[in-house]
Image (tube, grey):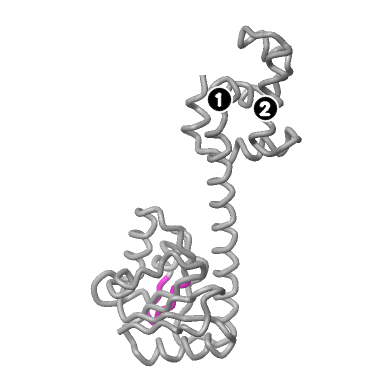
Amino acid sequence: MNELDQSRSDGPLVIVVDDDDAVRESICELLLSVGTETASFASTASLIEADVLDRPGCLILDVRMPGVNGLEFQGRLAANGISASIIFLTGHGDIPMTVQAMKAGAVEFLTKPVRDQTLLDAVDRAIAVDRRKRSDELAVRESILMFESLTPRERQVMKAVVLGALNKQIAFDLGISDITVKLHRASMMKKMKTTFVTHLVSVWQALPQAMRDAIG
C-alpha cells in the first residue's frame, strides 16, 4: 500500500515507511495538519517502485519491517550514492542499533510512541539537513562544470594559485612568461566566476580529489 498526497508539489516531501497501517496514517495526518506533503509505504520495496526518492525532504523509516528493514535500506541508499535525510522510528530500539543508525548518518532515532512535537521537530531538522546537502551537492556540480571549461594550462595555473604561488613562481615552474601567466590567470578566474583567491580556494576544495590530483 502506498499513498501520495498530491495537494502540493513545490515543498518538501516526507516519506513514511512503516508496515503498520495505523502508524503510517497517524504520522501522515500529523504532517498534513502542518502543511507538509507526505507519501506513505508499507515496505521499502514499494517505496523503490514509487520512484520518489529524488524529491527534496526526508524519510521516516521503521526499523523492523518485512523484507529489507530500515537499517539495511539506509545502507543500500548510501551504497548507491543516495544521500537521504533519515529519521528512524521504532518500537524495538536499543543502543547498538541507535549507534549504527547515527554513525551511518541518520538525523534522529526515535522510539514509539513518540510525542507529536518531538516528531515534528525531528522532521524540521531532517528537512534542513536535506536542504544543506542538496545545496552543497549543487555547488560541487557547478564547480566541476566551471573547472571542466578550463584549458590544461589554466588548470595548472589554478592549482598553483590556490597553493599560494605568485605569478613569477608560476611562470618559472611552468616555463612561461609572467605576462602569459597573467593572461591564463585572468581567463581562469573569469571562467571560475570569481575575482577573489579566497573564493577560488573554496571552489577548488569542493572539487573531487581525483580531478585535483590529475593536474600535471
Residue 56: x and y in percent read 51, 67
* Identity of the residue drawn at 41% across and 90% down: 25
Residue 89 is a magenta residue: yes
Point out the residue furthest to the left here.
67
Residue 91 is a magenta residue: yes
For badge 2, the amino acid type reads Ser
* Identity of the residue drawn at 41% across and 82% down: 4
Q: Where 116 falls versus 126 (above or below)?
A: below
Q: Where 14 falls versus 195 (above or below)?
A: below
Which image quadrant is residue 184 in?
A: top right
Residue at image mark 1: 151
Is the residue marked by circle 2 packed among few (<14), some (14-19), or many (20+) residues within 10 Å? some
Residue 166: x and y in percent read 73, 18
Residue 8: x and y in percent read 53, 80
What segment carries the magenta color? 87-94
Sequence-first disc among 1 and 2:
1
Which image quadrant is residue 94 in?
A: bottom left
Q: Are marks 1 and 2 in contact (CB under 8 Å)?
A: yes
Q: Where 116 falls versus 77 (above or below)?
A: below
* Identity of the residue drawn at 55% across and 25% down: 151
Q: Give the structural element (helix, strand or loop) at label 1.
A: loop
Mark sitting on residue 187: 2
For badge 1, the amino acid type reads Thr
